[in-house]
Amino acid sequence: MLIAAAVAAGSALLLVTLAGLNAVNAQNARYGWLATGTGTGTGAGAGPAADGAKANGHDPLWWRLTADFYRGQIIGRVDVAATGPRSAVPPGLSALPGPGQYYASPALAALLRSAPPGQLRDRFPGHLAGLIGPAALPSPDSLIIVTGYRPGQVASQPGARSVTAILTTPPSSCNGQNCAAAGGLNAAAIDLVLATIALGLLFPVVMFIGTATRLSAARREQRFAAMRLTGATPRQVSVLAATESVAAAAAGTAVGFGLCYAVRPGVAAFPFTGAPFFTGDLTLSLPAILAVAAGVPAAAAVASLTALRRVRISPLGASRRARPPAPRAWRLIPLAAGLAELAFFAVTGGLPSWRRGPGLTGMTTTGQLQAFLPGFALVLAGLVIAGPWLTMTGARLLARRARRPAALIAARRLADNPRAGFRAVSGLILTLFVTTVTLGVITTIAAHRGAHADAAARSTLVAQLPGQQQPGVTSPPVPPPSAAQLARLRGTAGVRGVMMVRTDPFGGHVQLPDGGGAITAGLVSCAELATVPGAGRCPAGAAAAAIPAQVIGPAGASSRSQAGHLWPAAAIPAGQLARLRVQSVAVATDGTGAAIERARTALERAYPALAAPSTPAEEAQLAGFARQTTEEQQLADVIIIASLVIAGCTMATSVAAGLTERQRPFSLLRLTGVPVATLRAVVTLESVVPLLLVAAVATGAGFLAAQLYLTSQLGYTLTAPGAAYYLIVFGGIAAALAVIGSALPLLRKITGPEAARNE
């Protein structure tokens, strides 16, 4: 029953992982339709079409995708206009919305009902015609709206395209193309994510299953030796051992399937990719079901037979336990080879030239998968292979310095069988390596890409007006705001200033603060600049100044605060400045969520043809800095939490198996007068020595592997992890010691005189 319970936990984690991988692909596929009109998808009619042209009998459909925001959440907005009755209909919609109608996702529809109209509802003209179905929603929490217009209204908007079909190519099938512009991951990125998860969990799960099947190995060895005395053949003993393990593992696997389906709702709610899943996406493919149903019991049978290799039965029926050979130093070779493979790419800077694509100077995501995955896998395997040798080395050092009986007994027992000593802590050791690598990489990336704390980047809205004409994209000139529009905007509650950034007729550039480089300049009135303090200030006495056209730099670590920065004066009369084309509008708010959303709604109503205004912090999120860091952190959380759970189960199972194996020897020691306290110290030392020694090697290898990856791929220097890392490490070690301590009270009960009898 114990073996079945242990295998049930391990197989359930494995099944949940496989179901999660399917959910990632299913979620990713539903991003495809949003990229309609990008011109990079496969299939006729998915890209731009000429006005009035038909393809496959379909009337053209005017299409415009933009991103809106509401209190830190991204809203996908699709403006459509049918040119005929046979215009394509997006998935999840029963029909195209007509002028004055819109379809909204259930989450957005609920938000429109609950949010004040002036903060959100007033941005979308018309009324709700229906809800968008799950076929078009990547997540239950997706905020998507499809609004209907007349063809002339959409055609005149910047970024509008005429298409004749809805894109059906999922981002995972783009093969590196940019057809995932509206979200999702391409095939190479998905391969890297899924391979990382599988690699991070596969080793701990395999170690856990192997440990579980050894739980009653010592007891079974005694029974099988007795059977040999009664005439059983070695083959019969092997069949009995395999049958017992397969039966228990099969029962545990069946329970694991039940646990997997029971926890699906909770797993679906976890935002692994930055958004939760639909419960129905967590499915298992038939090959995965067959592989787990057959593979776990088979692995249990192999582990059981491996555990019985040490039992040798003589022809007379006398049984003895064979002492395994001592591990040798060659076990360090795989670990060194894995680190050397990572170091090779750190020194050479990526894949060899013959492995790169044409014209490729860096390493693609596919290249990362090919280069780094084998190295990390080799390091993980190397830790498992080198663990017994490191344990033996630590045991011999302990024996030389032992001053008490407990230390000497523990050291001799570890040196006699270092594989068993390491096996008890192997799951936690692998978890420490995975945790060190993931948090080391994530912390460093976040330090270089993370959003800065500049208040202006979070409280100043910027609306960029269309500039240069792009092929296939309409960009008509946007008229300047009227005096009435400006008055309404300035009168919006929470708005502290409005500034117009105009085109520099001389095409000048300005230098960003702190040596940030030169950037295209725009011209502003100093009177308006004074109302937006986060954008900088004018020289004394100047009427106009040259500032960055984007007003405030993206919220990233490479940007610097512009508040208080002195910009150069612009020699242009005030009357001429007012006649220049407006290229962006900046609105300073008091920073509250309500004020930002009211100002955003007012800007969108004043400029309905513009993309949604956004703060620099939101723009960085849309560009991928914050979103990518968040998704990477979610990935790290999944691997770390699952690995810690598996490691805890492995530790508990190993302690139980170890006490069972040592029941009779400890009983004999008690009969010779050894106190129970000494035996408890022996048990503790046998676990603590390999735990601390190999944990130090694993964390050191993790930091080195993370540094090598960061150097070769990003040119970053490893940033020391924060308190969360040390909390996980020390918490994991403390939990391991607690598991060991929880078993110590049982030592007195299971090592009584009756356990010393020969059976």
Image: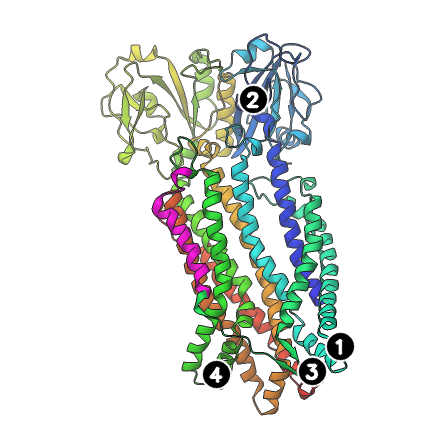
Q: In this view of the protein, which residue sits in the foreground, 396 or 755?
A: 396
- Label 3 sits on residue: 315
- Label 2 sits on residue: 123
**Contact flag, marks 1 and 3 (Cβ < 8 Å):** no
**Element type at marker 4?**
helix
The residue lying furthest to the top in this view is 52
Q: Earlier in the sequence, mark 1 or mark 3?
A: 1
> Please, what is the three-letter code of the amino acid marked with disc 4?
Leu
Residue 82 x/y as whole percent? 63, 13
- Label 4 sits on residue: 408
Query: How far apart in space, not on screen, are marks 4 and 3 (Cα)?
Result: 36 Å
Note whether 528 is above or below 12 in the view shown. Answer: above
Residue 741 x/y as whole percent? 57, 73
Which is more foreground, mark 3 or mark 2? Answer: 3
> Please, what is the three-letter code of the amino acid marked with disc 1?
Ala
Q: Earlier in the sequence, mark 1 or mark 4?
A: 1
At a point 22% along the width and 22% down the height, the residue shown is 541
Judged left or right of residue 17, residue 624 is: left
Query: How far apart in space, not on screen, are marks 1 and 4 (Cα)?
Result: 39 Å
At a point 66% along the width and 51% down the height, the residue shown is 15
Q: Which residues are magenta?
A: 331-354
The residue lying furthest to the right in this view is 230
